[in-house]
Image: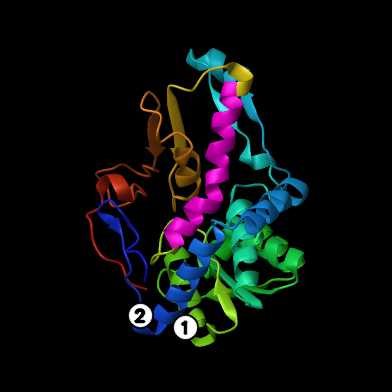
Amino acid sequence: MLKTGNFGKYGGIYAPETLMPALEELEAAFYRLQMDIAFNNNFRKTMREYAGRPTPVYLAGNLSKNWGANIYLKREDLLHGGAHKTNNAIGQALLARELGKTRLIAETGAGQHGVAAAMAGALFGMQTEVYMGEVDMERQHANVLRMKLLGATVHPVKTGGRTLKDAINAAMRDWIASVRTTHYMLGTAAGPHPFPSIVKFFQSIVGEEAREQMLAQYELLPDYVLACVGGGSNAIGIFNGFIDDEQVKLVGVEPAGKGLNSHMHGAVLSKAVTAVCMA
């Protein structure tokens, strides 16, 4: 590998030995293509003409009045597909084509990344298969229907807790067995290097736009940039646009569930211990 893929004390390369050649191939292609003008122009053109970028920054008048501060929303919900997940899915599909892959696989929890992966597969004519926990499939049935409508095959994962973690494990096992023809389109800022860096690169378009729009429309930078933190793709994208602005405070918001002192919350960065997780 060319780099260790660390973000401070986080990140790294913890993966089965059988996946190392695929990760090395992916890393080399990614570092080459992120500097390639033609590749980046194609990505930006596709995001503009197909996905509907740039998404607007909107001054939420009613929220601002209620909370006593100007609150601006970066409207990623208006992107084709309904979420920021489209950015990474389109980018990784283009990357997969450059690698000569003909098949895409993805994991999904709530279903937004699965829908984005299915959209990218349909756009570029690539076979697409999505792994989704049975519990999530029941909760997010509408997104399952959207994936199927777009031509993707959805595999129910029946092991473990039957949610996102188990879907990732199932997708990883598929990738090990089919790596020559298949690209694993990981949707979160997680997994072994270079996946977090890839997700950051394609999602950074959100932060770049937001910073430019704030200066162009309102002639100021925000005091705070807030982002919900689940898998991290949303937060890493918008934070990257402001990380060099010392006056802008970056705040990630995690789900507290039934309380941070209970065992039923999603605040893993705030409350969990640092550890190594291998698929």
Where the C terminus falls, by quadrant?
A: bottom left
How far across and how far down the image is residue 89, in percent? 61, 59
- Element at label 2: loop
Residues under numbered marks 2 and 1 in contact, where contact means CB atoms less than 8 Å apart = yes
**Distance from label 2 to label 1 (Cα)?**
9 Å
Q: Which residues are magenta?
A: 195-215
- Which residue matches tag 1? 176
- Element at label 1: helix
How far across and how far down the image is residue 128, in percent? 66, 73
Q: Is residue 100 magenta?
A: no
Residue at the image position 47 percent from the left and 69 percent from the top: 28
Location of residue 161 with respect to 245 vertically, above or below: below
Location of residue 29 with respect to 258 vertically, above or below: below
The amino acid type found where label 2 is placed reads Pro
How far across and how far down the image is residue 156, in percent? 56, 74
Residue 16 marker: 2
Residue 36 marker: none
How is this picture coloured? rainbow
Type of secondary structure dominating the magenta stretch: helix
Residue at the image position 25 percent from the left and 54 percent from the top: 9
Among all residues in the image, which is located at the extreme bottom?
177
Q: How many marks?
A: 2
The amino acid type found where label 1 is placed reads Ile
